[in-house]
Amino acid sequence: MVKDSGAAAGAGGLRLLNQPKPAAIEATPEGEPKSVVVHGRFQPVRAILDSWRIDDEWWREEIARRYFAIELQNGRTLTIYHDLVGGGWFMQGYEGPRESRSIVRQERSLRGK
Amino acid sequence: MNVACLLVPDFLVALARREHPELGGRPVVVGGAPEEHAAVTACSAEAAAAGVTVGSNLRRALALCPGAVFLPVQEGYARSEAELIAELVRERSPMVEVVSPGHVHFEVRGLPRMMGLSDEEFLAQLYESIATRARLPIRLGAADAVFVAHVAAVSEEREGRREKGETSNDELRTTVGRNLRAKAEDLPQFAIRNSQFPTLVPAGQEREFLAGAPVDVLPVDPVMHLRLRLFGLEWLGQVAEIPLSAMQAQFGADGTRARALARGEDHSRIIPQREEVTITEEIDLPAPAASSEPLVVGTEALLQRALAHNDVRGQTVRRVDWWLGLESGEQVGRRVVFREPTSDPRRMLFVLRNKIERIELSAAAVGLGLTLSGLCSEYAHQANLWQLGPRRQRELEEAIEQLNARAGDPQVYRIVEVQPWSRIPERQLALVAFGS
C-alpha cells in the first residue's frame, strides 16, 4: 500500500475502494447468514469465522452494521454485513480493519460486563 | 517383493580389505594416521569391539586399540567404487536410491516375473552377480517395504557373522545393535533367515520378522535409541506392542513413525537420484596456440555449440568446466561456478575470458574443451516495479499514459489512505489514478 503523499487527488481520478455491494443472503432466525448467492447460485455457509458490530455517526446519519467473516462450502471467505438501520445485506471484499474490530470487541465485552 | 536393500557393511574397511587381504580379521581404522588431528571415518568390527567409534579422535582410537591398522581415507577411490556398485544395481533395476556409499535401495517389483524366475532365484542371482563383480562382502535383503528390506539386509549381516563364526558374541553386539546390553545368545531369532543367500521377507510376515530386530535399526535420532532402551525396549517387537498414545506422548512424531515401522507399516518409496545432464564439447585447435586470443575464440565457438544442444534448451547453466590439452600431453583446467545460473553465452564467455587470460601455459595448446553442468530451470528475477531508478519510472509513467489514452479512462490506480482512522471500511481507502 502506498502512503498518502498529501497531494490533492484529481476529482476525476478518485474512486472509493471497498464500496458495499448488495448481496443476496439467506439468514437464520437469529440473524446469522446461512447461505450466500455467488454467481447466481446459493452457496451454503460452512463456518462463521468472525462477527463484529459497528455503531457510528448516530449524531447524523446513523450507521449500525453487524459484520460476519464467513467461509463458504467451497472454501472461499467473504466479509458481509447486515445493515441494521436500513435493512438488507451487503458484501465488502475488504476485511475490516483489525484495530477497529478489536476495539469493537473490547467495547462489546465491556458492555457485556 | 517390491524393494531390495544392498549393503556393504563397513564399506571403507571392506574396500581396504579387498585391496589388502592380509587385513582380514585385524582391527582396521580409516581416517588417517593416529598422529593426525582427524576423526575416525570408519572402523572394522574388531576395532569397534575395542571401543573405537566413528567420529572419535584418531589418537583415542590408537589408545583404545593399539594393534589397529590405521589407513587414510581415499575419498575419490571410495566414491568411484560406491558409484560402481550403484551402477551394477542400475543395470538390473529401473529405480535405485543411493542411501550412502555402499548402501543402495532399489525397486525389484515385477523383475523376477519378467525374467521368468522365482523371487528367491532372482535374489540369489542378483547377489552372486554383484558380489562377484564388486568383490566385496555384500548383504542383500528384500521385502515389500523399504524399511523391512533394509532390516533384512542388516539382520543378515548379523546372522551371517554369527554363523560363520567371524566374530565373537561381543563383536556381534557392535555390528548391528551397537551398545546393546543383551548378549548375543539372548537375541530373538529372526522369523526368516538364510545367511548364505539374501534374506527375503515374504508379504504378510513383516511384523513377525521385524519383532526380533533391535531398536537401533530404526531410522531415528540415536538419542531416541538410547531412550527406548532406557524404557526397556530393546526389540522392535516390544515397540510394536506399545500403545500409540504412549509412543506419541514420549517421542512425538518420531514415536508414531517408529511404532508404525516396528509394525511393518512403511509407505516410503524409493527416491531415485536424478541423472545429471552434462554437455561436453571439444575441439582440436587448427594450430598450436600460445596466446589467449585463439583460446577465447575457440571457447566462444564451443559455448555456442554446447548451448545449441537440445538438453540445454530452456535451461540455465550453473557450472562450466573448461580445459586445455597441451602439446606436452598435460591438461590445464578451470572450473567456473556462476553466482546465478545463466544461459547467456556472452556472460559465460566474460567470466571464462578472465580465467583464460590469466593462465600461463607451459606449452602450446592443441585442444580445447568444456563441459556444462548443473543445469537448472530458467532463472527469473522478480524486479521491484517502483524502485528501478528515474529512467525506469519515466518509462513506466509513459506506458501508463499511453494505456489511459487508449482506453480513455484511468486504467492504473494506487491505493491511498483517506480516513485510516474510520471504522467504516469504505471510508478508509480510495483509489487514485496513477500519476494524478
Image (cartoon, coloured by chain):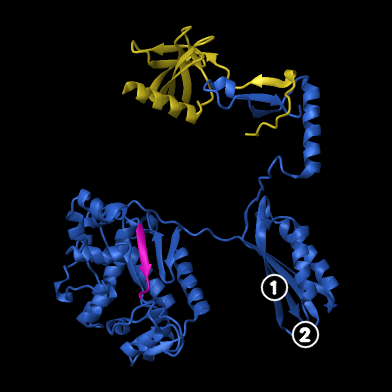
Chain colours: A yellow, B blue
Mark 1 sits on what residue? B334
Identified at 81% across, 71% down, the residue is B295
Q: Is residue A50 visible?
A: no
Distance, label 1 to label 2, CA atoms, is 15 Å
Q: What chain does badge 2 belong to?
A: B
At label 1, counting other C-alpha atoms closer than 10 Å, the crowd grade (few under 14, some 14-19, many 20 or more) is some
User: For the residue marked with disc 1, what is the amino acid?
Assistant: Arg
Say whether residue A90 is left or right of residue B163. Answer: right
Mark 2 sits on what residue? B362
Say whether residue B4 is left or right of residue B159. Answer: right
Q: Return the disc, 1 or 2, that comes first in the chain's sequence.
A: 1
Does the magenta portion include B4? yes
Q: Main secondary structure of the magenta part?
A: strand
Q: Is residue B76 above or below residue B90?
A: below
**What is the x, y in percent for residue B292?**
83, 74
Secondary structure of residue under mark 1: strand
Q: Is residue B271 visible?
A: yes
Q: Is residue B44 above or below residue A94?
A: below
Secondary structure of residue under mark 2: loop
**What is the x, y in percent for residue B33?**
45, 89
The total of numbered circles placed on residues is: 2
Does the magenta portion include B410? no
Q: Is residue B235 above or below residue B183?
A: above
Q: Quadrant of the C terminus of chain B?
A: top right
Q: Quadrant of the N terminus of chain B?
A: bottom left
Identified at 72% across, 21% down, the residue is A13
Magenta highlight range: B3-9
Residue A19 placement: quadrant: top right
Q: What chain does badge 1 belong to?
A: B
